[in-house]
Image (cartoon, grey):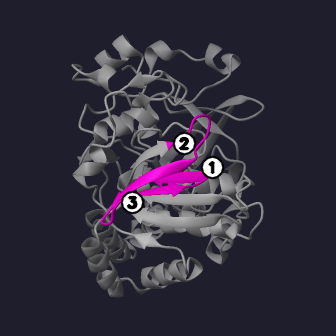
């Protein structure tokens, strides 16, 4: 089965929703796909117990209700084919062809290994948010939030709203960096209001800067953590630890399509021009895919990409100044929450790095590239296809993550049987 669209948008988070609506507003037939059952992405993931923010409800409603937009939920991209994408939903596979393609595939958490990080009861900060919103029981549980970035505040607020006892938030960035960043927020009043709102929700919850979780303790599940901060080592008994060190762009689809990537530090992002055009004709990218910038940046870039994909660059031009202002905030964010070198030193030689295949850090000694390490140790060959350990190893300075092979995600045999992988996505 093959469907054709004027504009196809991959990802239904803030960027994808904005792109789809902008393109449809010019009369384009738009397809919007996402692997989740509901739109909103990670930022606006549906909460089974609490109502979504008003902005999320407006953005999702106006997009999914638009008559020119086909909403294709629970649909994953399997691979790239000439002139289109092979996708799979719960019932069947289909080929989606397009005149223009907007990539809004978002980001995932950067998880860095430390002793005990594989114990049950430990998740990423965003992972805890997702679990709570989907009904994971947190009421009465003692939760520690750690890592770096504003996501820690959001995760703590979500946990508290779901009945958790949040023992503390432990930010690796220094007090000086946080204070400098807070003083700069006058340039972005909406962000200042958002930050104050989160802090009000978390009244009474300690927020410690310059602090990292060095070790998690437990036999069959988490019992306690050791936090290294300005006061020395603090041993904290807890039931749940959520620790994340920022976000990484999901560039795998863009890479498969041949889009040029650029490095920011150890990690890759998609290179775009003023209209969010990538290096490949007819393909656009927006949001975290182009550099971690947050919800507001994603919405602006998504709208720019949608207008440009529909051929209406004049409408996109009116948003360029807003995007520049939003990207300045992203730059300030990245400077404030840059990782301290001691975070990179948390993993010990016997610490598992690839938890899918039980590969320790010391097992990777002597390898200078991901491919040779994978062939010798199976690092990156597990269920996550190297998405977790690959990002961690790049951040730790071992070697960059290797290219993605098809399929991009696990697919049914019936779908794979009709695909000629030898002619596409060559490594």
Q: Which residue is mark 1?
A: 31
Q: Camera-side residue: 101 or 247?
A: 247
Secondary element at tag 1: strand
Neighbour class for label 2 at 10 Å: few (<14), some, many (≥20)?
many
Residue 323 pos. (x, y %): 36, 71
Neighbour class for label 3 at 10 Å: few (<14), some, many (≥20)?
many
Residue 409 pos. (x, y %): 56, 30
Quarter of image, res 42:
bottom right
Q: Are marks 2 and 1 in contact (CB under 8 Å)?
A: yes
Depth-wise, is mark 3 or mark 2 nearer the camera? Answer: 3
Residue 387 pos. (x, y %): 45, 35
Q: Main secondary structure of the magenta part?
A: strand
Whether residue 286 can be seen here: no
Cα gap from disc 1 to disc 3, whole angstroms:
35 Å
Cα gap from disc 3 to disc 2, whole angstroms:
39 Å
Q: Which residue is mark 3?
A: 148
Q: If the image is split into quadrants, where does the N terminus sit? A: top right
Cα gap from disc 2 to disc 1, whole angstroms:
9 Å
Please state the extent of the stretch shown in magenta in the rendering: 217-244
Quick one: label 2 or label 1, which is nearer the N terminus? Answer: 1
Quick one: label 1 or label 3, which is nearer the N terminus? Answer: 1
Quarter of image, res 258:
top left
Point 50% across, 32% down: residue: 83
Q: Which residue is mark 2?
A: 98
């Amino acid at each position: 089965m093959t469907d054709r669209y004027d504009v196809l948008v991959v990802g239904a988070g803030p960027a994808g929703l904005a792109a789809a609506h902008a393109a449809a507003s010019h009369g384009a037939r738009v397809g919007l796909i996402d692997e989740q059952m509901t739109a909103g992405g990670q930022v606006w993931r549906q909460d089974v117990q609490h109502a979504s923010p008003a902005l999320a409800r407006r953005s999702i409603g106006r997009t999914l209700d638009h008559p020119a937009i086909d909403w294709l939920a629970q649909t994953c991209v399997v691979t790239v084919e000439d002139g289109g994408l092979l996708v799979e939903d719960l019932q069947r596979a289909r080929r989606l062809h397009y005149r223009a393609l907007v990539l809004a595939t978002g980001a995932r958490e950067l998880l860095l290994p430390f002793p005990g990080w594989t114990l049950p009861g430990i998740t990423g900060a965003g992972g805890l948010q997702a679990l709570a919103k989907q009904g994971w029981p947190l009421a009465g549980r003692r939760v520690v939030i750690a890592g770096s970035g504003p996501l820690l505040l959001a995760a703590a607020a979500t946990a508290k709203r779901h009945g958790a006892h949040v023992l503390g938030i432990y930010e690796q960035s220094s007090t000086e960096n946080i204070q400098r960043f807070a003083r700069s927020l006058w340039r972005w009043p909406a962000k200042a209001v958002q930050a104050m709102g989160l802090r009000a929700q978390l009244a009474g919850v300690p927020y410690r800067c310059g602090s990292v979780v060095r070790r998690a303790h437990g036999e069959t599940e988490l019992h306690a953590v050791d936090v290294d901060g300005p006061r020395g080592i603090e041993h904290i008994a807890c039931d749940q630890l959520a620790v994340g060190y920022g976000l990484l762009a999901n560039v795998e689809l863009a890479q498969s399509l041949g889009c040029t990537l650029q490095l920011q530090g150890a990690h890759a992002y998609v290179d775009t021009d003023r209209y969010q055009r990538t290096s490949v004709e007819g393909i656009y990218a927006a949001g975290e895919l182009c550099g971690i910038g947050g919800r507001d940046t994603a919405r602006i870039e998504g709208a720019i990409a949608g207008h440009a994909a529909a051929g209406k660059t004049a409408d996109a031009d009116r948003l360029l100044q807003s995007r520049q202002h939003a990207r300045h905030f992203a730059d300030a964010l990245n400077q404030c929450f840059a990782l301290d070198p001691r975070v990179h030193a948390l993993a010990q030689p016997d610490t598992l790095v690839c938890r899918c295949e039980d590969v320790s850090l010391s097992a990777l000694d002597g390898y200078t590239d991901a491919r040779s390490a994978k062939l010798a140790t199976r690092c990156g060959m597990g269920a996550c296809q190297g998405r977790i350990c690959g990002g961690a190893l790049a951040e730790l300075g071992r070697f960059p993550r290797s290219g993605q092979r098809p399929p991009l995600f696990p697919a049914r045999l019936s779908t794979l049987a009709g695909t000629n992988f030898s002619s596409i996505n060559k490594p």
